Amino acid sequence: MTINQAATQLDPTSSAPIKFTVVFSEPVTGFNNNETDLSGSTAGGSLMSNVYDSGDHKTYEVRVNNMTTAGDVIAKLNSGTATDSAGNGNAASTSTDNKVAWQPASGNTSPDVTIESPAFGMVYAKGSSAINPLTVKAHFVDPDNGPWTYTINWDDNGAVSTGSATPSSATFQGTHSYTAAGVYTINVCVKDATGANGCSSVWIVVYDASAGFVTGGGWIDVPAGSYTANPTLKGRANFGFNSQYKKNAIVPTGETEFNFQVGNMNFHSTAYTWLVVSGYKAQYKGTGTINGSGNYDFTLTAYDGDISGGGGVGKFRIRITGANNGNAVIFDNNISKPTDMDLADPEAISGGSIVIHKA
């Protein structure tokens, strides 16, 4: 798999977005907004990436936004960013020219974008009126170089909304209907007349209460670095869980227990927030306690190896954070990977089973 600056991309440039072309050797899925690795860039700002599928699911265009000061924009893809039909993750990208110099117009200020609604992490039922369509409302501030235009990338098969955002500080909005369960990263960008743009991002969760439920029980071999209180600890951890939507429920129910004996850590769930099931993948979020006390958030990702694309082996990952401690990570058995369901790269279980049950 390769990523290089697009054939039409000027280098250096003062006009955003900066475009890269990604070519996989076969059709893939799961390559979404903000999943391109831009950590090697020297351009200032919280860089964001929008992904556009050419239609063959092999060739994609990545458009990078939100640069605020001059420097290089360097793009790469880490291993496991996308998967083929058999559930195999991609290898890390190779490149011949994956760097573009960003040189903004002298003295120009990039737009500062604020998303007013929806709130980050909002959860919606598939088919509900709130997402048919969903309305995203935003405003921006920019003291110079109008007029301005906005772009909303909905992270849903290349769907995009565009329009005029003039004048500065004006509120604008766009709508899009979501028909499939998933976790979506919506990027909202405003571009000024010099080519600079500013962006903001929001996640939403769409769940399908009729899609099924997930159960699991067994153990994993926890790698060193997973338990932040003592990163040297490793060894067996037992897990057991179930998560499902009962009839007419809008919040899933079930129980999750995770016991890392070496670290004397026993996590037990107290409530669930949402559940998403998609093919061989399931992910749900909730709260719980450790050793019977405290208040912790958790996200559990599970893959059923026996479903098409699952790769033949069940996989499990749990990320536990301190709800009252700045969301500091307490435990994560793949701490270096994103928590997005498609990119979470859960660990193969050492024993037991994970089963996604169809409704």
Image (tube, rainbow, N blue to C red):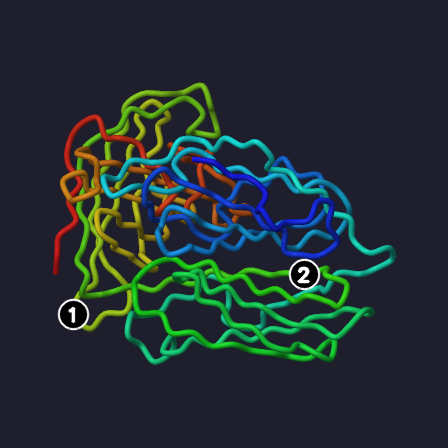
Numbered badge on residue 261: none
Which type of secondary structure does the marked residue at label 2 adopt? strand
Q: Position of residue 313 (x, y in %)?
A: 19, 33
In the rendered image, which residue does mark 1 sit on? 247
Numbered badge on residue 198: 2
- In the picture, measured across the screen, residue 242 lies left or right of residue 205, that is left
- Gap between marks 1 and 2, in whole Å? 43 Å
Mark 1 is on which residue type? Lys
Q: Position of residue 110 (x, y in %)?
A: 75, 61
Quick check: 292 above or below 126? above
Q: Nearer the viewer, residue 144 or 248?
A: 144
Mark 2 is on which residue type? Gly
Q: Position of residue 161 (x, y in %)?
A: 51, 72
Q: Nearer the viewer, residue 63 or 359?
A: 63
- In the picture, measured across the screen, residue 8 lies left or right of residue 112, that is left
Quick check: 256 above or below 157? above
Disc number lying in front (1 or 2) = 2
**Picture quadrant of residue 169:** bottom right
Neighbours of disc 2 within 10 Å: few (<14), some (14-19), many (20+): many
Which type of secondary structure does the marked residue at label 1 adopt? loop
- In the picture, measured across the screen, residue 353 lies left or right of residue 143, that is left
Q: Residue at x 60, y 73 (%)?
A: 138
Q: Residue at x 43, y 29 (%)?
A: 227
Q: Nearer the viewer, residue 251 or 121?
A: 121
Neighbours of disc 1 within 10 Å: few (<14), some (14-19), many (20+): few
- In what quadrant of the picture does the C terminus appear? bottom left
* Sequence-first disc among 1 and 2: 2
- In what quadrant of the picture does the N terminus appear? top left
